[in-house]
Image (cartoon, rainbow, N blue to C red):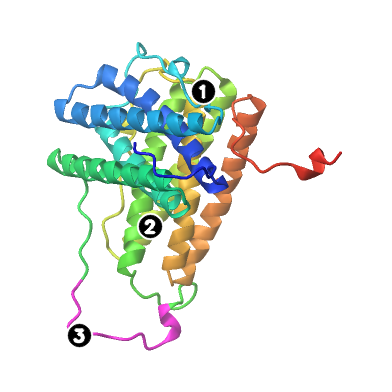
Amino acid sequence: MEEKHTNSHLTASEVSHLWTAYQSNTLAICGLTHFLTHIEDQDIKEILEESKLVAEQKNNEVIALFNAEDYPIPQGFTKEDVRSDAPRLFSDALYLEYILNMTIISLSMYSMALAGSDRNDVIQFFSECLKSTKELHIKTKALLKEKGLSSKNPVIPIPQQVEFVKNDSFLSGWFGERRPLLGIEISNLLFHSKRNALGHALITGFSQVSPSKELRRFFEKGRDISEKHLSVFTKLLHVDNLPQGSPLLTSEVTTSTTAPFSDKLMMYVVTNLINSSIGEYGVSISTSPRHDLALQYTRLIAEISKYANDSANIYIEKGWMEQPPIAADRKELAK
């Protein structure tokens, strides 16, 4: 990648987003390494291979940026975190759903990273990340449609003319008659349904294979939470006679009880999903005028935030949590 920056050091924002990208890409490489060992569908295999190649290329660029700054290369995830010889845990179809979800999270992450970058070389890096991720997202979505694996989103009526909201029942939802869901509210509920269905399947698989009783119980709790959240979104859609989100994907999980990944890696996947969901629920609050929807999202955020805290505590207790980029402790230095 062409160097276009001056002698300025990486900013706090830049180094943090690069550090996070490295963690996410090493995670992806490990997961895809195992997936590619068992993949049967040639079309899906090509998507997985492209995903792995992109992750490897981007990580090499992060390493180059860090080396130029004498910044320590994070540990991330390594070959020690994956067992390529372990039996298949998920189906080809779930691999493809996972890739789609990974691109959605990455598009959000790289957009924030680009917005928070100042140096030309870092701006160029995250611009390229966005471009390659967007292309992968489009290819994956197209293949899901081609394979008949994507659900059709509902269509809402076209208004005959421009209309304006006339009373405050537009905002109500706790008492009295509720208005039908807005298009954006439908979009949010469908997205969260699909995300929780995927999360439920992944955590179900992890609960089968973890050698740790403590983590199996933790994963089982997460499985129950995701199923509960899926039920909440499904019921809200059902009231307006809309397609009810996504069915559970448990059938895409095999009966294997041999772990293909380390407990550390599986915990990180779950933590990533939780953190992403907290952010997405927050966005949904801001785009859902109906008060009952905001209340539901607030309640669900509180529930998964507690689960996220439990996850962080386990991660720290096990000695798995790498120290993210952090400001100097001036009080400690002054002692």
The residue lying toward the viewer, choosing from 121 and 239, is 121
Q: Quadrant of residue 184?
A: bottom left
Q: Which mark is residue 225?
A: none
How many residues crowd mark 1 within 10 Å: few (<14), some (14–19), many (20+)?
Answer: many
Which element carries disc 3, helix, strand or loop? loop
Q: Are marks 3 and 2 in contact (CB under 8 Å)?
A: no
Q: Is residue 116 visible?
A: yes
Which residue sits furthest top?
Answer: 85
Q: Which residue is mark 1?
A: 263
The disc labelled 2 sits on which kind of residue? Lys
Quadrant of residue 60 within the rendered picture: top left
Q: Residue, x 37% and y 26% (percent of image)?
A: 29
Contact flag, marks 3 and 1 (Cβ < 8 Å): no
Q: Determine whether the residue tagged by mark 1 lies in a helix, strand or loop.
A: helix
The residue at which mark 3 appears reads as 161
Taking the image as shown, residue 235 lies to the left or right of residue 278, namely left
Please give the residue where the numbered disc 2 appears in the rendered image: 235
Foreground: disc 2 or disc 1: 1
Q: Is residue 331 magenta?
A: no
Point out the frontmost of discs 3 and 2: 3
The vertical placement of 33 against 268, above or below, is: above
Q: Is residue 85 left or right of residue 313?
A: left
Residue found at the very far bottom of the displayed protein: 166
User: Which picture quadrant has residue 79?
Assistant: top left
Which sits in the foreground, 14 or 252? 14
Name which residue type carries label 3. Answer: Gln
